[in-house]
Amino acid sequence: MNNLIGVMLEEPDRSLFTIEQIKAWGAIDGTAMDEMIQEAIDGMVDLAQEELNISILPRTVQATYESTIGVVSPPYGPIIEIESVKDLSGDDMGYRMVGDLIYPAKKSGCVITYQAGHETPPKGIEQALKQAILTAINDREDNALGGVSRIPTSSRRKLMKYRRY
């Protein structure tokens, strides 16, 4: 059994949407809601990445396994590039890759560091997240304490086809 014991995520170097893009898409004027819009963007993107087990934008992911069964499906794909596969003492370890599956050379603990995400996210993800962000903004009374806490059902249905298991 693969025993994942830790994941470190580096934040992407850009946001999926700008405040201006969401305001244009939702026909929102003025700057009074800019902070709330940014919170909705960040909150919905974070929720979607967690629920779908994907990286929407490129970022570095480091997954640490206490043990493996010979094949690993790392979290938060799709994988763009493997940076390193090391054993738990930090020594390089051979591997081969088929799709998003990694076959470490040893059936032992390892640390896999990789770039994951989409250079250009699928349009379906973008559309569903825009819809979710605008719903969160329109339901701001419900989200006032603590920001967004769930993806609206209609948007969630559209996003689920991108889920990694």
Image (cartoon, rainbow, N blue to C red):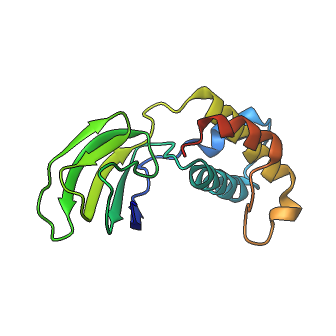
- Where, by quadrant of the figure, is residue 1 drawn? bottom left
| Residue for point 12% across, 57% down | 92
Q: Nearer the viewer, residue 31 or 91?
A: 91
| Residue 64 % position (x, y) | 33, 64
Image-based side of 161 in relation to 61, left or right: right
Q: Residue at x 54, y 43 (%)?
A: 164
| Front-lying residue, 75 or 105 | 105
What's the residue at 75%, 45% (across, down)?
132
Task: Give x and y (percent) for residue 21.
Answer: 64, 37
Q: Is residue 25 above or below residue 90?
A: above
35 left or right of 5 in image: right
Residue 58 vertical placement versus 65 (above, below):
above
Q: Quadrant of residue 142?
A: bottom right
- Residue 161 placement, left or right of 121: right
In the depicted view, which residue is nearer to us: 122 or 89? Answer: 89
Closest to the observer, 11 or 2: 2
- Residue 5 placement (x, y as % from top left): 40, 70
Q: Position of residue 138 (x, y in %)?
A: 86, 50
Quarter of the rendering containing residue 100: top left
Residue 6 versus residue 69 in the image, above or below = below
